[in-house]
Amino acid sequence: MEEGDEIIVPEPTFSEYAFGAHLMNGAVVKVPFDEKYSYNADNLLAAVTSKTKLIYLCSPNNPTGTYLPEADLRRLLERLPARVLVVIDTAYRHYATASDYSDGVELIREGYPLLALNTFSKIYGLAGIRVGFGIAPESVIRTLLKVKEPFNVNALAQAGAQAALTDYEHIEASRAMNEAGREQLYSGLRKLAIPFTESMANYVLVELGEEADRIYNQLLQRGIIIRSAKGWGLHQHVRISVGTEKENHILLEALAELV
Ligand SMILES: *Cc1c(COP(=O)(O)O)cnc(C)c1O
């Protein structure tokens, strides 16, 4: 990124992409989601200018839980000018159960200029060890290596990450528990007639309306921490993490009293 270069981000999404661009004096072009926060690949393509360097995709997206289907990702990659690098943040990929979800790896194998970002902070439960990794074609990685500092992820964190990668039992147990928890939240929210966006992640974006702030604060007083979505400009929404069956139950009971 040089001064004046542009990145394209969906809106609303994880704030780090814009943060990084601002550090480099780049400009951030925000492309709103369609209805129900679904991605629109054509709108992303239409936002490309001669100054576009990067397109960030967050799939599943934080905070909406929506994702870019594989066919749309492929179409995007086929139509973009070669100088534009697509970065797909797949922090929540393990939770995605839709059959047309793509974590980008297949497309990278096919040679598309795509960088897939991964973290140990989500399903692996290792946010404190500060490790992630990226997958990209060799030419992209060679470019990154020109600016990468020589100091690496520390050896303890590497050992933890390496062990976590093949802990399939943990991954599958977490994934299954999250899928059941999402369904539990959906059915509880439907009973309360509270609108929400179906999620491929481990949280659900919920629309509480004008009372969102009051409900958020009253839940907090009861020791139930959800996330206000105000920081994303969604003043009538909250983002609720999927908990254990018991936690989800306690939350739904409290919501029934407060809404
Ligand atoms: C949590 C998260 C990350 C990963 O953050 P770490 O710095 O690896 O802990 C990346 N992208 C999104 C969208 C996230 O929500």
Image (tube, rainbow, N blue to C red):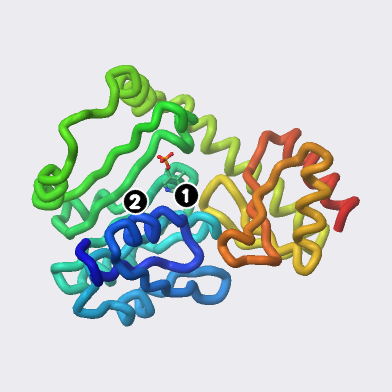
Q: Are marks 1 and 2 in contact (CB under 8 Å)?
A: yes
Pointer 2 residue? 103
Residue lying at the far right of the rendered structure = 257
User: Is the CB of mark 2 within 8 Å of ligand 1?
Assistant: no
Question: What amino acid is at disc 1?
Answer: Ala
Q: What residue is drawn where x is 32% and y is 47%?
A: 117
Which residue is nearer to you in this view: 62 or 36?
A: 62
Residue 102, relative to residue 53: is it above or below? above
Question: What amino acid is at disc 2?
Answer: Asp
User: Badge 2 local density, few (<14 within 10 Å), some, or many (20+)?
Assistant: many
Q: Position of residue 11 (x, y in %)?
A: 47, 68
Q: CA distance from mark 1 to mark 2?
A: 9 Å
Pointer 1 residue? 96
- The quadrant in which the C terminus is found is bottom right
Q: Position of residue 180 (x, y in %)?
A: 63, 42
Residue 162, relative to residue 88: is it above or below? above
> Where in the image, quadrant-wise, is ligand 1 located?
top left
Q: What residue is drawn where x is 48% and y is 26%?
A: 170
